[in-house]
């Protein structure tokens, strides 16, 4: 069955380190998204991509970057991790057709920055 | 940034009761989605609404796309313990996939 996976599921790192979170989907969806989830804020969009080599900034993109070298993967990089980036991160994918445009989420990565 | 107002923030109900939650926005949306999130998991899509006035059911769940395109509600009938979780509404401004999420409604069901 097609699916979307994230790794690692849990990560502890130190302030200032570079961290990369992986997202892989097997639906062959063109659209991929990264969100962070914090108490009281729901899900907030970090970056998104509409296809290979396409990347766009979301609502809370500062301190994060993404690259899209193939359809299946959209890794999220924290260039220099900060304690404010402690959060749960979700990847999602979707494919737009007229009348059907829904996003499917991965299981999440819990990141702690000490 | 753009926000959706979702209410209530939390609900504590008895098994068998009906539940209603809603989302409102100052902007018009083309699509409304309702997700459920279980602890430690990603959100799972429950219902998708694509037309103003649309009323859609999925088992005990019913959702409606408001005719003004600025609101949506979700009803759960005859709640059961496995309904426990956080429910999110999400609106889509245009084609292309970007979603705006509500803050979530945390549902607790007492057996």
Image (cartoon, coloured by chain):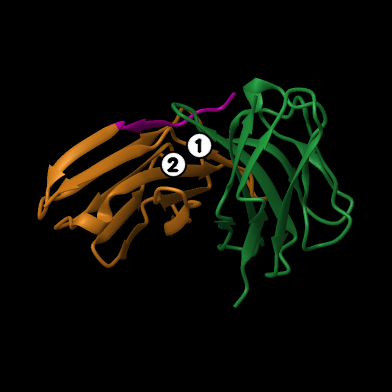
Chain colours: A green, B orange
Residue B35: x percent and y percent?
A: 43, 51
Magenta run includes residue B5: yes
Classed neighbour count for the residue bearing mark 2: other residues with Cα under 10 Å, few (<14), some (14–19), many (≥20): many
Residue at image point 37% right, 45% down: B87
Residue A18: x percent and y percent?
A: 81, 33
**Mark 1 belongs to which subunit?**
B
**Mark 2 belongs to which subunit?**
B
Camera sees residue B66 = no
For the residues bearing labels 1 and 2, Cβ distance under 8 angstroms: yes
Residue B86 drawn above or below residue A50: above
Mark 2 lies on residue: B69
Residue at image point 73% right, 69% down: A28
Residue in the foreground of this view, choosing between A31 and A84: A84
Magenta run includes residue A19: no
Compared across the picture, whether A37 is left or right of A40 comes to right
Residue in the foreground of this view, choosing between B25 and A109: A109
Residue in the foreground of this view, choosing between A88 and A91: A88
The picture quadrant where one finds residue B102 is top left
Camera sees residue A63 = yes
Residue at image point 22% right, 43% down: B108
Mark 1 lies on residue: B28
Label 1, label 2: how far apart the Cα atoms are: 5 Å
Check residue A60 in the rendering and tell me which mark sits there, or answer none: none
From the image, give the main secondary structure of the stretch colored magenta: loop
Compared across the picture, whether B9 is left or right of A6 comes to left
Stretch of the chain drawn in magenta: B1-9
Residue A106: x percent and y percent?
A: 58, 56
Which circle's residue, 1 or 2, is located before the other in the chain?
A: 1
Instruction: Label 2, secondary structure: give it.
Output: loop
């Amino acid at each position: 069955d097609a699916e979307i996976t994230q790794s690692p599921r849990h990560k502890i790192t130190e302030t200032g380190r570079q961290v990369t979170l992986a997202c892989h989907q097997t639906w062959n969806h063109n659209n991929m998204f990264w969100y962070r989830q914090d108490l009281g804020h729901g899900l907030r969009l970090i970056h998104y991509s509409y296809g290979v080599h396409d990347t766009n900034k979301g609502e809370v993109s500062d301190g994060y970057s993404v690259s899209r070298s193939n359809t299946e993967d959209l890794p999220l990089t924290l260039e220099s991790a900060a304690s404010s980036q402690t959060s749960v991160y979700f990847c999602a994918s979707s494919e737009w057709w007229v009348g059907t445009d829904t996003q499917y989420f991965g299981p999440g990565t819990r990141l702690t920055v000490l | 940034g753009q926000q959706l107002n979702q209410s209530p923030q939390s609900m504590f109900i008895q098994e068998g009761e009906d539940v209603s939650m809603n989302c409102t926005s100052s902007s018009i949306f083309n699509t409304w989605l309702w997700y459920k999130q279980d602890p430690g998991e990603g959100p799972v899509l429950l219902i998708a609404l694509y037309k103003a006035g649309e009323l859609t059911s999925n088992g005990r769940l019913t959702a409606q796309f408001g005719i003004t395109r600025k609101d949506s509600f979700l009803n759960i009938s005859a709640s059961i313990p496995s309904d426990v979780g956080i429910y999110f509404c999400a609106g889509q401004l245009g084609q292309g996939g970007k979603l705006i999420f509500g803050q979530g409604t945390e549902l607790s069901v007492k057996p």
